[in-house]
Amino acid sequence: MTTAVIVATVYTATIGAPLYCDTYNTEYSFHPDQAPFLAWPFDVAGGQCGDDILVTINDKKYWYKALDSGLFGKHCVIQPDGHCAPIAVDIPEFFAPFDGLSHVARAVNVSEEWRKFNRRESR
C-alpha cells in the first residue's frame, strides 16, 4: 500500500470577491457568512463545482463545498524530511481548522466518489 503525504493550505482574498468554480459568473463570493467552502484543484483532481469534500486533519473530519479553484494542485509544501507534499485543498483562512499556513491532511471528493459508484452500479 502506498501512503502519500498531502497538505491543506490557507488562503485569503478580498471579502466579496467572486469565487471561481468553473466560471467567475456565479453567485458565490469569498465571505465567512456562508457554508464552509474551499478551493479544489479541479485541473488535476477533477470534480464539479459544489462537490462535497471531506477533509481529515488530526483524525478530525471537516465538510466543505468545492466552490473555488486554483492551480495549486501542481504545487507542494516542503516537509521537515525534505519531501515535497502535494497540496490537496486550499481553505479560506476563516474556515481553516488549523494554525499556520499549511497542515498535513487527507481530502476526498465524496460527490465524485458517489458518481463513480453510481456509474458502476448502473452497468
Image (cartoon, helix red, strand yellow):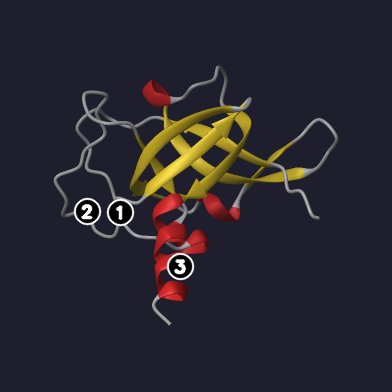
For the residue pair 65 and 115, the one nearer the viewer reads as: 115
Q: Check disc 3 and report its element: helix, strand or loop.
A: helix
- Identify the residue at horizontal 39%, vertical 54% (top origin): 111
- The amino acid on which the numbered mark 1 sits, given as a three-letter code, is Cys
- The amino acid on which the numbered mark 3 sits, given as a three-letter code, is Lys
Q: CA distance from mark 2 to mark 3?
A: 27 Å
- Of tags 1 and 2, the one toward the viewer is 1
Q: Residue furthest right?
A: 81
Q: Residue furthest bottom?
A: 123
Q: CA distance from mark 1 to mark 2?
A: 7 Å
| Residues marked 1 and 3 touching at CB (< 8 Å) | no
Picture quarter containing residue 27?
top left
Q: Position of residue 50 (x, y in %)?
A: 29, 50
- Of tags 2 and 3, the one toward the viewer is 3
Identify the residue under disc 3.
116
Q: Is residue 43 above or below residue 34?
A: below
Q: Position of residue 78 (x, y in %)?
A: 73, 38
Q: Check disc 2 and report its element: helix, strand or loop.
A: loop
For the residue pair 68 and 114, the one nearer the viewer reads as: 114
- The amino acid on which the numbered mark 2 sits, given as a three-letter code, is Tyr
Q: Which of the two labelled residues, at mark 2 and mark 3, occupies the earlier sequence position?
A: 2
Neighbour tally class for label 3: few under 14, some 14-19, many 20 plus, Cα within 10 Å:
few
- Identify the residue at horizontal 51%, vertical 37% (top origin): 55
Identify the residue under disc 2.
24
Identify the residue under disc 1.
21
Q: Position of residue 75 (x, y in %)?
A: 61, 50
Q: CA distance from mark 1 to mark 3?
A: 20 Å
Q: Which of the two labelled residues, at mark 1 and mark 3, occupies the earlier sequence position?
A: 1
Residue 64, label in figure:
none
**Quadrant location of the N terminus in the rendered image:** bottom right
- Identify the residue at horizontal 37%, vertical 21% (top origin): 94
